[in-house]
Image (cartoon, rainbow, N blue to C red):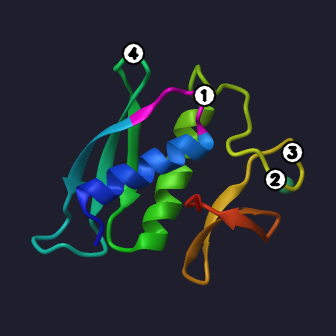
Amino acid sequence: MLSADDALALVNALIRDLGGASGWVAANAVHQGLHPAPGAGDTFLIEIRDAQGRTAGWVSIAAGDAALAAESAAANLQDLLAESAEMWGEPVPRCDLHGQHPMTAEVVDGTAMWRCGGVSVRPVVPID
Ligand SMILES: [Zn+2]
């Protein structure tokens, strides 16, 4: 079970990796519990603010499992960045193998990976 702080740290790491030019920051995590007890159905809604402090959008992430959290955060942040004024027309993230198109986030063997054409290219969560 992800905490709100874990959720913000995850999204901020993904913003640094995917949208470094955007100036965005994950500012606020709102827990959306579907059940009285924390469980796999829970999500966090993460408020993303732009460099001027305005709300740029919201990213929904699964809270129950680390790999699903990373996959869902990556996919939803990818959509938000791709539609933003800051990153319009950029492949987010640019495929490391081919350069011209974005990759797709998928969980493979318990790890969220950026993939292209069924090939795992690199982990979604950057390893520093
Ligand atoms: Zn590719």
C-alpha distance separating marks 1 and 3 = 18 Å
Q: In the rendered image, which residue does mark 3 sit on?
A: 99
Q: At which x and y percent is residue 118?
A: 79, 70
Q: Is residue 76 above or below residue 119?
A: above
Q: At which x and y percent is residue 86?
A: 59, 22
- Label pair 3/2, CB-CB below 8 angstroms: no
Q: Which picture quadrant has residue 104? A: bottom right
- What kind of residue is marked 1? Ala
Disc 4 Cβ-to-ligand 1 distance below 8 Å: no
Q: In the rendered image, which residue does mark 2 sit on?
A: 96
Label 2 residue SS:
loop
Q: In the rendered image, which residue does mark 1 sit on?
A: 21
Who comes first in sequence, dot 2 or dot 1? 1
Point out the image quarter for the C terminus.
bottom right
Residue 52 marker: 4
Label 3 residue SS:
loop
